[in-house]
Image (cartoon, rainbow, N blue to C red):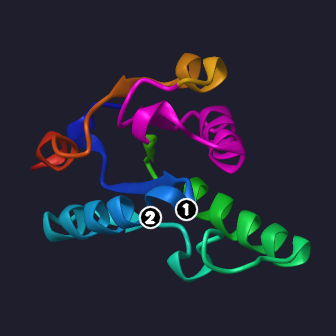
Amino acid sequence: MDLDEIKSVTICSSSKFYETARQLAAKLRSIGVVVHTPRFDFNEELVEVSREKKAELTREFLKKIHESDAIYVVDQHGYTGPSVCIEVGFASALGKRVILSEPARDGAVAALASAIIGVDKFPAALRR
């Protein structure tokens, strides 16, 4: 799938980078892309999430990935975190494009990536 064929994307991000993810989501929506995001209200840097709630949120998020054409990983300084690693593996197993904002430090994530496009350049790459 070429980038110009992507109509929907799920943004994957550690809670450390939620502000960047939130800003990117707004830019993508402004150009007509359907965007799925993490639940920003469950920022694990600000609130404690129980094991049961984490499982529920993870299943909810994997469904968003299933419904998307691709995922875009905000991995500032190459950091993904364990949840994003799961999301990348799931997306890859479904045959989705995995696009990173920066080269990943995790070797498995790097190996599954189909492209690296900076946050500032990604909306323009999808413009119709």
Q: Is residue 66 left or right of residue 100?
A: right
Q: Secondary structure at mark 1?
A: helix
- Label 1, label 2: how far apart the Cα atoms are: 5 Å
Residue at image coords 75%, 78%:
48
Q: Residue furthest front?
A: 46
Instruction: Name the residue located 57 percent from the left edge and 40 percent from the top edge.
Output: 80
Q: Is residue 111 left or right of residue 20?
A: right
Give the residue type at disc 2: Tyr
Residue 93 on the magenta span: yes
At 55% from the left and 62% from the top, the residue drawn is 15
Residue identified by numbered label 2? 18
Q: Position of residue 32 (x, y in %)?
A: 19, 66
Q: Which residues are magenta?
A: 76-104
Q: Which residue is mark 1?
A: 15
Q: Is residue 67 visible?
A: no
Q: Residues within 10 Å of mark 1 (few under 14, many from 20)?
A: many
Residue 94 in which image quadrant: top right
Q: Nearest the camera: 14 or 62?
A: 14
| Left or right: 63 as drawn, with respect to 50 | left
Mark 2: give few (<14), some (14-19) or many (20+) Cα within 10 Å: many
Q: Are marks 1 and 2 in contact (CB under 8 Å)?
A: yes
Tell me the SS state at disc 2: helix
